Image (cartoon, rainbow, N blue to C red):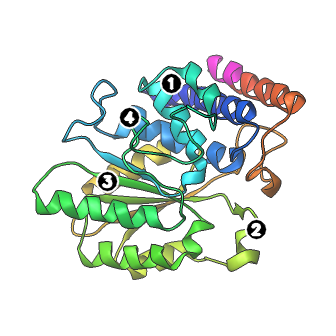
Amino acid sequence: MNNLDLAKTANEVRKGIVTSVHSAKAGHPGGSLSCADLMTFLYFEEMNIDPKNPKKEDRDRFVLSKGHCAPALYSTLAHRGYFPVEELTTLRKLGSHLQGHPCMQHTPGVDMSSGSLGQGISVAAGMALSAKLSNDSYRVYTLLGDGEIAEGQVWEAAMFAGHKKLDNFVVIVDNNGLQIDGKIEDVCNPYPIDKKFEAFNFHVINIDAHDFDQIRAAFEEAKKTKGMPTAIIMKSVKGKGVSFMENQAGWHGKAPNDEQYEQAMKDLEKVGEALCQK
């Protein structure tokens, strides 16, 4: 897909995020919206996957380490064809396979159950090591929140991945600057994030999370990097695309009411119209 088509698809993914969280009357829209461009690029451009065969052995693996942002993963999977988009309205409902955090047993396309912060990167590093030991060609990707990296287990996994020289492993940090309690530098300052990963023997790339040229270039660079894992630190906007949610920590884990939902969808419709004029 070209970058314009990716942007249009990401906007549809954002509509799915807002719709599912509104329907559930619960969920995490802010951090889901901030990573929608990245998720769209991974599933529509980067990864070797097949929605018709979600468990194919040579598929690339993705672990959503910040599992509370499941609405972003679900909307991406739905738009990619893993299950009907209409099912997004069943988020967090009894009997639905779209629970509040990803569950690999019940949701097509989910490679790892996640939600307990810090653990996803450890599992993903293990997957990458497994590929190396088995001489398999698949690559492994994991997405962390910038608040999540305050978890000590993240750095144990980073030390392990760097030590094992897992060059088939890409860690992405969604640096939107906000977590549930406010600004990340006020809660437990993780900066400089890039220097920390460099210290653990990662090749580090800093990008704008909403620029598909930069996203594409970063993943191409990651593929060419040998002998060490890659960390992509992407500067993003929490609540991206919805005017009243952008850069507001209060929208970390709150669902829009009916009036707010209508406004959010109008905002995203305007984005879509602007993209169609390009």
- Crowding at mark 1 (Cα within 10 Å: few <14, some 14-19, many 20+): few
Quickly name the residue at label 4.
45
Toward which corner of the image does residue 36 lie, by quadrant? Answer: top right
Q: CA distance from mark 4 to mark 3?
A: 15 Å
The segment highlighted magenta reads: 272-278
Q: CA distance from mark 1 to mark 4?
A: 11 Å
Q: Earlier in the sequence, mark 1 or mark 2?
A: 1
Which residue is located at x 54 percent, y 26 percent?
A: 9
Q: CA distance from mark 1 to mark 2?
A: 33 Å
Quickly name the residue at label 1.
5
Above-or-below relation of 261 to 253: above
* Magenta stretch, main secondary structure class: helix
- Crowding at mark 2 (Cα within 10 Å: few <14, some 14-19, many 20+): some
Quickly name the residue at label 2.
183
Q: Can residue 225 be seen at all in this image of the molecule? A: no
Q: Nearer the viewer, residue 228 or 157?
A: 157
**Disc 1 residue type?**
Asp
Q: Earlier in the sequence, mark 4 or mark 3?
A: 4
Position of the C terminus, as image quadrant, is top right
Looking at the image, do the residues carrying marks 1 and 2 touch, with CB atoms under 8 Å apart? no
Which residue occupies the extreme bottom position in the image?
Answer: 199
